[in-house]
Image (tube, rainbow, N blue to C red):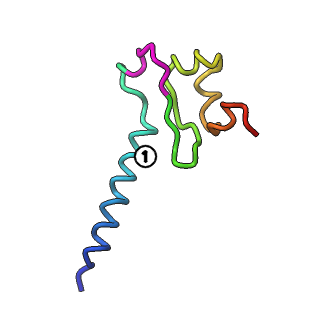
């Protein structure tokens, strides 16, 4: 028995989400690294997954130290 259309659609969503997650955790493209505009990205739970050097410099903290913090922690909220 073949999977139904709902299963196939859900599988497509899972694949798109997985590709997006891989892209979010991949190293930045050289153009993004050189942007003067602060750039950061977080997951659905609001956990910072990465940033460019301008973002880290803007906050005065290294990019390694920022990874894994929640957006609320960046704002100083408990």
Identify the residue at the far bottom of this view.
1
48 displayed left or right of 35: right
Structural crowding at the residue carrying mark 1, measured as other residues with C-alpha within 10 Å and reported as few (<14), some (14–19) or many (≥20)? few
Q: Residue at x 58, y 25 (%)?
A: 63
Q: Residue at x 52, y 32 (%)?
A: 50
Instruction: Find the magenta span and give its range.
Output: 32-39
36 displayed left or right of 4: right
42 to 30, vertically: above or below: below
Image quadrant where one finds the C terminus: top right
Q: Give residue 30's position: percent from left, percent from top.
A: 36, 20
Badge 1 is on which residue? Answer: 21
Secondary element at tag 1: helix
Q: Give residue 26's position: percent from left, percent from top.
A: 42, 36
59 displayed left or right of 14: right
- Determine the image quadrant of residue 57: top right
Q: For the stretch drawn in magenta, what is the main secondary structure?
A: loop
Q: Residue at x 36, y 25 (%)?
A: 29
Q: Residue at x 69, y 35 (%)?
A: 73
Q: Give residue 54's position: percent from left, percent from top.
A: 51, 16
Q: Nearer the viewer, residue 48 or 28?
A: 48
Total tally of numbered discs in the picture:
1
36 to 70, vertically: above or below: above
1 displayed left or right of 38: left
Identify the residue at the far right of this view.
78
67 to 36, vertically: above or below: below
Residue 15 belongs to the span the image colors magenta: no
Image quadrant where one finds the N terminus: bottom left
């Amino acid at each position: 028995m073949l999977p139904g259309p709902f299963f196939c659609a859900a599988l497509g969503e899972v694949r798109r989400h997985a590709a997006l997650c891989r892209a979010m955790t991949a190293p930045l493209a050289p153009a993004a690294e050189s942007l003067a505009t602060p750039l950061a990205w977080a997951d659905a739970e609001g956990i910072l997954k990465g940033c460019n050097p301008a973002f880290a410099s803007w906050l005065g903290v290294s990019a390694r130290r920022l990874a894994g913090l929640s957006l609320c922690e960046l704002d100083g909220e408990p």
